[in-house]
Amino acid sequence: MLITSAFDSGNISVVKQDTPQDVRLLINKDNKSDFYQWFHFRASGVADTPVTYVIENAGGAAYTEGWDNYKVCASYDREIWFRIETTYDGKALTWEFDAEQDSIYFAYFAPYSIERHADLIANVAGSPLVKTSVLGHTLDGQDMDLVEIGYGAQGRRKIWLAARQHPGETMAQWWMEGALAYLLDPDNPVAAALLDKAHFYIIPNMNPDGSRRGHLRTNAAGANLNREWKDASMKRSPEVYLVREKMAETGVDFHMDVHGDEALPYNFIAGFEGIPSVSDKQLSLLNTYQDLLMRISPDFQRTHGYPLDTPGSSDLRKCTDYIAETHGCLAMTLEMPFKDNADWPDEEFGWNPERCRHLARSCLDALHQMIDEL
């Protein structure tokens, strides 16, 4: 038996793997940071062998409430990720599994590798509706990819979509995969109607370095990108700096920042209610969008989420607050669960890539219904 994680987005350290009944593991911290919770590793030589996996430092993770009622993700082929019963005792995360094949992968959520990201960019670049460009480079030298859809159109609404400021929130890029497929489907009349009125600027992965390194929340410098928007710099947070500069050039009429929440088993939206210049129009648009999305998708709800910001309490280091304040537009943060959607649970797969893709389609349907109001 062997435990390994020396691959794209891998993260685990082995304390002990002498016997299958007691495999002891540790999650590594993000570089230059105390954040950790993302894990992704391969167990090989385990066919027909009951193995007990114990992550010893789960109790010190960034969001320990994320372990309550959590089920680990597992896959033989790295395409279909199913859930395994998991226990958390306040210190360690433990699961037992008897694999049917020689090797199996485990992860905090279905991973989305940099290689899959590269394939995504290459695939969409073939559409005549698409222009791809590189805004600049990360601290590790990776490309910051921008996908524009409807390139060459004039006078259309400027729609910005961004995902994975926090690299361990891989559900955000599965959402992006669904959004891009929806917009580029030549048989989709709603997409055609949207593209008649909107020019899309899409950042499928805001944090390539953290993604490749197997980080939960930060980039190569240990920066939480969702706290860098007010004072972004090429030295510490080039990812945000480059996107912020492009937004200043194009303008923004609508922005969705796609994330995942460790603790709450629901899909919900967080807004910008506390920004200094908040307007009645912005708040009305935010309310309208959420109501539309809730009617369109049973996977979205408004009962559970973050407390509303009180007036004047905004943090302009955060993406949504910064963009709403700077551009006077409708901006929001979409949160999806690491666990499952408690309103529509799936015991075998939990919240999963395909449901992320479906939610993306619903989000664009909602945008279509209110595009004229932006």
Image: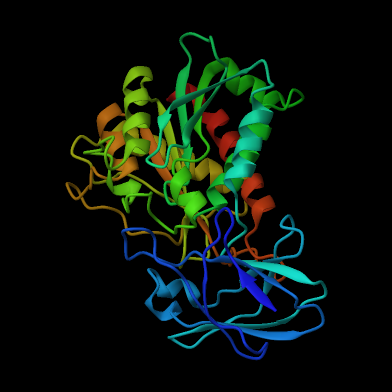
Position of 250 with respect to 81 (left or right) is left
**Residue closer to the observer: 210 or 110:** 210
Q: What residue is at 38 percent from the left and 18 percent from the top?
A: 250
From this view, report whether residue 178 is shown above or below residue 326. below
Picture layout, residue 98 above or below residue 319: below
Residue 235 visible to the viewer: yes
Residue at x 56%, y 67% (from the top left corner):
339
Q: Residue at x 31, y 33 (%)?
A: 241
Q: Tell me residue 101's x, y (percent).
A: 82, 72
* Residue 13, horizontal then vertical, whole percent: 50, 72
Q: Is residue 47 left or right of residue 4?
A: right
374 or 90: which is nearer to us?
Answer: 90
Q: Nearer the viewer, residue 136 or 247?
A: 136
Instruction: Tell me where residue 312 appears, x and y as whole percent.
Output: 17, 46
Q: Give the quarter of the figure containing the N terminus.
A: bottom right
Q: Is residue 229 left or right of residue 6?
A: left
- Its colouring scheme is rainbow
The answer to whether 169 is drawn above or below residue 35 in the figure is: above
Which quadrant of the figure has residue 64? bottom left
Quadrant of the snapshot with the C terminus:
top left
Q: Position of residue 295 (x, y in %)?
A: 59, 46
Residue 359 lies, with reference to residue 345, above or below; the image says: above
Instruction: Name the residue located 51 percent from the left edge and 50 percent from the top edge.
Output: 212
Pick whichever, 321 or 17, lies toward us.
17
Taking 362 as reference, is 207 left or right?
left
Asked if one can make out residue 360 in the rendered structure from this viewpoint, the answer is no
Q: How many marks?
A: 0
